[in-house]
Image (cartoon, helix red, strand yellow):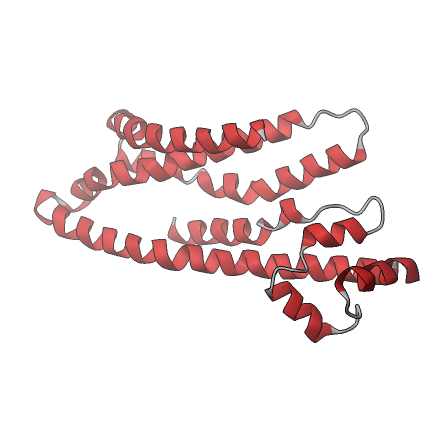
């Protein structure tokens, strides 16, 4: 909990620092070079699932290898990426002026902000859909794990939820009602079953990195 709280707070600080810091850095590096630096956000986002998987594997597998280097790389990379987001806002007007001149900067910037507002609506909806798909896939993987573990696990499931594990329609209704969740299935899953929750955003990260690559 303390790590998560500090992480979220650091993201907010990173956004604020990015808005002020990168505008100052762009005066030294130049606008084009600064935007090239912002491209580092692509590998940062694309590598996040790997760091998450490795951290979970080390935590569950033991072996004496420290998980902190991976956690801190994830932490630092996330904060750096969010500073880029804040920096794009602050550097964009000056960059547009450099490219197209002051005369047209206002109109172009206005159109860019309109497109940005549209992406702020469509983007989260699309990424939330990907997360939802990942959640459903993880939940059904757990169901298959329970089903393959034997009669005892199947009986425990049917006793807990009052439905057959092979009754797909009833399972979907319980999932939609938030009665059947990953957390509850983990209580019935065999010992050693890995919690898939940390991996639910893998597809989201890969798609986000791909979209950023196209934009770059």
Residue under the image location 74 percent in, 59 percent down: 141
Q: Nearer the viewer, residue 208 or 37?
A: 208
* Image side of residue 176 versus residue 209, left or right: right
Q: Position of residue 87 (x, y in %)?
A: 32, 35
Q: As displayed, is residue 61 above or below residue 158? A: above
Taking the view exactly as shown, the residue that stands out farthest to the right is 151
Q: Position of residue 16 (x, y in %)?
A: 33, 30
Q: Nearer the viewer, residue 21 or 185?
A: 185
Q: Position of residue 86 (x, y in %)?
A: 33, 37
* Image side of residue 117 versus residue 196, left or right: left
Q: As displayed, is residue 163 above or below residue 66? A: below
Q: How many marks?
A: 0
* Image side of residue 172 versus residue 190, left or right: left
Residue under the image location 74 percent in, 54 percent down: 185
Residue under the image location 38 percent in, 60 percent down: 122
The quarter holding residue 65 reads top right
* Image side of residue 63 versus residue 196, left or right: right
Q: Nearer the viewer, residue 3 or 204?
A: 3
Q: Position of residue 100 (x, y in %)?
A: 16, 47
Q: Quadrant of the N terminus?
A: top right
Q: Is residue 9 visible?
A: yes
Q: Nearer the viewer, residue 213 or 182?
A: 182
Residue under the image location 57 percent in, 54 percent down: 203
Q: As displayed, is residue 81 above or below residue 148? A: above
Q: Is residue 37 visible?
A: no
The quarter holding residue 90 reads top left
């Amino acid at each position: 909990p303390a790590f998560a709280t500090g992480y979220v707070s650091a993201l907010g600080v990173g956004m604020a620092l990015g808005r002020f810091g990168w505008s100052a850095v762009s005066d030294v590096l130049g606008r084009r070079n600064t935007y090239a630096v912002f491209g580092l956000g692509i590998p940062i986002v694309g590598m996040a699932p790997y760091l998450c998987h490795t951290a979970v594997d080390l935590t569950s597998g033991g072996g004496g290898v420290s998980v902190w280097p991976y956690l801190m790389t994830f932490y630092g990379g996330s904060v750096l990426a969010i500073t880029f987001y804040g920096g794009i806002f602050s550097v964009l007007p000056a960059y547009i002026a450099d490219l197209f001149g002051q005369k047209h900067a206002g109109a172009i910037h206005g159109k860019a902000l309109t497109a940005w507002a549209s992406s702020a609506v469509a983007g989260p909806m699309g990424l939330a859909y990907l997360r939802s798909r990942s959640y459903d896939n993880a939940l059904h993987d757990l169901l298959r794990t329970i089903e393959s573990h034997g009669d005892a696990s199947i009986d425990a499931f049917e006793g807990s939820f009052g439905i057959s594990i092979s009754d797909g329609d009833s399972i979907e209704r319980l999932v939609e009602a938030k009665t059947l969740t990953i957390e509850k299935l983990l209580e019935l899953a065999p010992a050693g079953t890995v919690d898939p929750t940390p991996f639910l955003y893998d597809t989201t990260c890969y798609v986000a990195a791909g979209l950023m690559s196209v934009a770059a």
